[in-house]
Image (tube, rainbow, N blue to C red):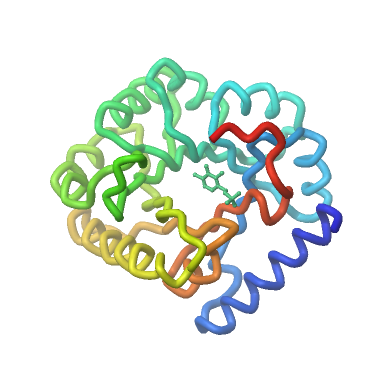
Amino acid sequence: MELDERLQHIRDRMFAACELANRNPSEVMLLPVSKNHTADSVRELTYHQCRVFGENRVQEAKLKISACPGNIDWHLIGHLQSNKCRDAVRFFNMIQSVDRMSIAEEINKHANNAAKDMPVLIEVNVAGEASKHGFKPEDLIEKLDTINNLPRLEIHGLMTIAPWTSDSEKVRPVFRRLREIKEECEQIIGAPMQHLSMGMSGDFEVAIEEGATIIRIGTAIFGPRPNAKK
Ligand SMILES: *Cc1c(COP(=O)(O)O)cnc(C)c1O
């Protein structure tokens, strides 16, 4: 299958999942994840109404972004080291992977230096996996006010990466829990948050049923990642 056919196939499945969940498809954004794929593939997708892409490494993204059309929005979805913060703030339109207090403060500092407000999502380690980054739910509840008080951070919602499983039904409780945590967060900050970024190639339909507003799709659009680093 060609890139545009795989894209159309994913869009068809998104629409079907929205229909099943009684949701308006315009509420769910498809974020193609172009990590380990070329600027040419990105450009090809822009011919099919893709305008926002996800990357998980700042170094790789920097090179790709400069080789891609300038009207694309880029979301950082991978773990961010503090020495990459300045570039992350400069090159990305949203950072979805705010996974600890120190990085929230560092992003705020660099955003302030750049006189820029930075849209972010807070990453939550819902299932408490040792191998994953992100706030534990109870830590987030405790620290949310402090994060929310960082003047250059605009909190647009939450992100999670579900545990890997071949049975997508098993991740439903994780997605449901993230939605509940978002509601708790909205109580704390006294304002609605727009986004729940959850669901990837293997589990996005379940995520849509549970309220995802951003689904992050790599393999199912681009095919297997060449030289994927585990
Ligand atoms: C790579 C990646 C994705 C996409 O994964 P696929 O299973 O290839 O769709 C989504 N989210 C994050 C954070 C990623 O690193």
In the orientation shown, which residue stands out farthest toward the left?
142
- The answer to whether residue 109 is above or below residue 153 is above
Quadrant (top left/top right/bottom left/bottom right) for the C terminus: top right
Residue 126 point in image, percent of width and height = 30, 54
Q: Residue at x 26, y 60 (%)?
A: 181
Q: Choose between 118 and 222: the one closer to the eye.
A: 222
In the orientation shown, which residue stands out farthest toward the right?
2
Residue 119 point in image, percent of width and height = 44, 41
In the displayed structure image, the side of residue 190 where residue 197 appears, left or right? right
Q: Residue at x 63, y 79 (%)?
A: 16
Q: Residue at x 75, y 59 (%)?
A: 7
* Quarter residue 2 falls in: bottom right
Residue 72 point in image, percent of width and height = 68, 40
In the displayed structure image, the side of residue 2 where residue 142 appears, left or right? left
Q: Residue at x 18, y 55 (%)?
A: 188
- The answer to whether residue 229 is above or below residue 81 is below
Quadrant (top left/top right/bottom left/bottom right) for the N terminus: bottom right
* Quarter residue 117 falls in: top left
Q: Choose between 190 and 98: the one closer to the eye.
A: 98
In the displayed structure image, the side of residue 50 where residue 33 appears, left or right? left
Figure disc tally: 0
In the orientation shown, which residue stands out farthest toward the front?
166
